[in-house]
């Protein structure tokens, strides 16, 4: 897993040959999300505080 960042227990990563549109993934414990880079659309579940930190 190509890790971009690790902070506050959150791991942010991108997969090289993943599907379109461009997006990144984040994991926090058992929670996982995918965030579209251009639109900011979030798929998945994350605690509110952790989600704010990722989107910031």
Image: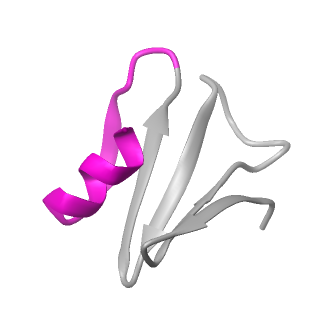
The residue depicted at 19 percent of the width and 60 percent of the height is 49
Q: Residue furthest top?
A: 38
Residue 54 at what x, y percent from top left? Answer: 40, 49
Up-down relation of residue 38 to residue 49 (above or below):
above
Magenta stretch contains residue 8? no
Pick the front one: 51 or 25: 51
Picture quadrant where residue 35 is located? top left
- 34 with respect to 19 (left or right): left
Q: How many marks?
A: 0
- 50 with respect to 34 (left or right): left
Up-down relation of residue 35 to residue 21 (above or below):
below
Residue 20 at what x, y percent from top left? Answer: 65, 26
The residue depicted at 54 percent of the width and 52 percent of the height is 25
Residue 2 at what x, y percent from top left? Answer: 80, 60
Up-down relation of residue 29 to residue 32 (above or below):
below
Q: Residue furthest bottom?
A: 29
Pick the front one: 14 or 19: 14
The residue depicted at 53 percent of the width and 25 percent of the height is 37
- 29 with respect to 13 (left or right): left
Picture quadrant where residue 11 is located? bottom right
User: Which range of residues does the magenta coloring cover?
Assistant: 38-56
Q: Residue furthest left?
A: 48
Pick the front one: 45 or 7: 7
The colour scheme used to paint the residues is one colour
- 24 with respect to 9 (left or right): right
Quadrant of the frame with the C terminus: top left
Pick the front one: 6 or 44: 6
Quadrant of the frame with the N terminus: bottom right
Residue 12 at what x, y percent from top left? Answer: 58, 58
Magenta stretch contains residue 43? yes
């Amino acid at each position: 897993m190509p890790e971009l960042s690790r902070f506050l227990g959150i791991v942010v990563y991108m997969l090289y040959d993943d599907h379109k549109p461009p997006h990144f993934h984040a994991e926090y414990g058992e929670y996982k999300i995918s965030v579209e880079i251009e639109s900011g659309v979030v798929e998945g579940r994350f605690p509110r505080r952790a989600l704010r930190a990722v989107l910031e």
